[in-house]
Image (spheres, helix red, strand yellow):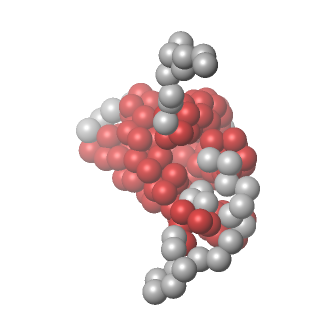
Amino acid sequence: MNPPDRSRLAVPPIVGQLVRYGAVGVANTLIGFGIYAFCADLLGIQYEVSLAIAYVIGAVNGYLLNRHWTFSGHDADHSTSGGRYAAVQVGAFLTNLVLLHTAVAWLGVEKNIAQAVIVPLVFGLTFVPNRLWSFAHRAAAVGPVAGGSQSP
C-alpha cells in the first residue's frame, strides 16, 4: 500500500474559480479600460458614456469566459445564466458609475485614475453573486425537493 501523496495540497474548487475569475477580470479590465480610455480620451466621448460602452463589451466577454471556463456553467441555460449575469453586471455598472461620478465631479479626481481605483472594488463585489447565482449549477441552485426524495 502506497502512502498518500502529500506533495499536492487539495485546493478547494472555490480557490480555482476565484483565480480563474481574477484572470477573466484582469483581461476584462485591460479590454474595458482600453475601450474606456479610447472613447473618453481619444474620441472625446463623455466619461459616463465611455464607461457604459466599455461595460457592455466587457460584460459579453466576461459572460462567455466565466460561463465556459471559470464556473463551467454548461448545464445552466443561457436564458437563466445570461439574465442573471446581466443583472449582476447592471448592478456593478451602476455602482461603478456612482463611484466614478462621485470621484470625478465631487472629489476632483482625474477620470482615468478614479476608474483604475474603482475597478478592483467593483470586481470584488461581483464574484459571490456570479458564483452563487449567475452560474450556479442546477442541482446546487434547486436543491432537494421538499417533502420527498429525489430519484436518480
Q: Is 27 on the left-hand or right-hand side of 9? A: right
Taking 58 as reference, is 91 above or below it?
below
Q: Can residue 58 be seen in this view?
A: no
Q: Which residue occupies 68% across, 48% down?
A: 72
- The single residue placed furthest to the left in the displayed view is 107
Residue 107 in the image, given as x and y percentages of width and height: 26, 38
Taking 60 as reference, is 2 above or below it?
above
Q: Nearer the viewer, residue 119 or 80?
A: 80
Q: Is residue 144 visible?
A: yes
- The single residue placed furthest to the bottom in the displayed view is 147
Residue 35 in the image, given as x and y percentages of width and height: 64, 37
- The single residue placed furthest to the top in the displayed view is 7
Taking 74 as reference, is 42 above or below it?
above
State the quadrant of the C terminus. Answer: bottom right
Total numbered badges shown on the rendered structure: 0
Q: In which quarter of the image is residue 31?
A: top right
Residue 127 in the image, given as x and y percentages of width and height: 47, 46
Q: Which residue occupies 54% across, 46% down?
A: 51
Q: Which residue occupies 62% across, 47% down?
A: 71
Residue 80 in the image, given as x and y percentages of width and height: 64, 69
Q: Which residue occupies 51% across, 28% down?
A: 10
State the quadrant of the N terminus. Answer: top right
Q: Which of 56 and 89 is in front in this view?
A: 89
